[in-house]
Amino acid sequence: MARILAIDYGKRRTGLAVTDELQIIAGGLTTVDTKNLLDYILSYIGKEPVERIVVGLPKQMNNEPSENMCRIEPFVNRLRKLVKIPVEYYDERFTSVLAHQAMLQSGIGKMARRNKELVDEISATIILQSYMESRRMRFEK
């Protein structure tokens, strides 16, 4: 089996998470400057087997796309042209809030919780874990 890569796309920084090869658990990979994101992804999938890329879909509470969608959509379109694997969106609402809660519950100190790169990486991990759980639920029905 190959990995699944998740992207929490941001204007300045982007959090990345990846599954293990058996797709059992999601783990944070890194945070990358968004301007270097495409190069990083192409390099990563050149070294590691990746079967799918999941991109956080930013939506507002009323289900309308958030302002970040105008940056994400051109990136995803370009990525789809460059890679031969599926690239799909997955709802990312509340992932930043959940990331902060996870950091609090894990006992991470106040200064570390201000680390926006760590928040982005944890958010990507939450997107990926939620995606994997939704897939399992679909297959179990």
Image: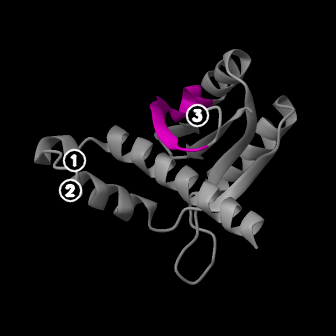
- Residue 66's label in the rendered image is none
Instruction: Estimate the x, y position of residue 21 in percent, counting from the top left.
Output: 64, 31
Is 47 above or below relative to 90?
A: above
Quadrant (top left, top right, bottom left, bottom right) of the N terminus = top right
Q: Quadrant of residue 5?
A: top right
Cα distance in 3D space between marks 3 and 1: 26 Å
Residue span colored magenta = 24-37
Query: Looking at numbered disc 3 in the image, what kind of residue is underneath it?
Result: Asp
Residue 36 magenta-drawn?
yes
Residue that numbered label 3 is attached to: 20
- Residue 113's label in the rendered image is 1
Pointer 1 with pointer 2, Cβ within 8 A: yes
Pointer 3 with pointer 1, Cβ within 8 A: no
- Residue 104's label in the rendered image is 2
* Observer able to see residue 134: yes
**Which numbered mark, 3 or 1, is in the foreground of this view?**
3
Instruction: Estimate the x, y position of residue 98 in percent, counting from the top left.
Output: 37, 62
Q: Quadrant of residue 64?
A: bottom right
**Which numbered mark, 1 or 2, is in the foreground of this view?**
2
Cα distance in 3D space between marks 3 and 2: 25 Å
Judged from the image, the secondary structure of the residue bearing numbered disc 3 is loop
Q: Residue furthest bottom?
A: 62
What is the crowding at mark 1: few (fewer than 14 residues within 10 Å), some, or many (at least 20)?
some
Residue 82 magenta-drawn?
no
Mark 1 or mark 2, earlier in chain: 2
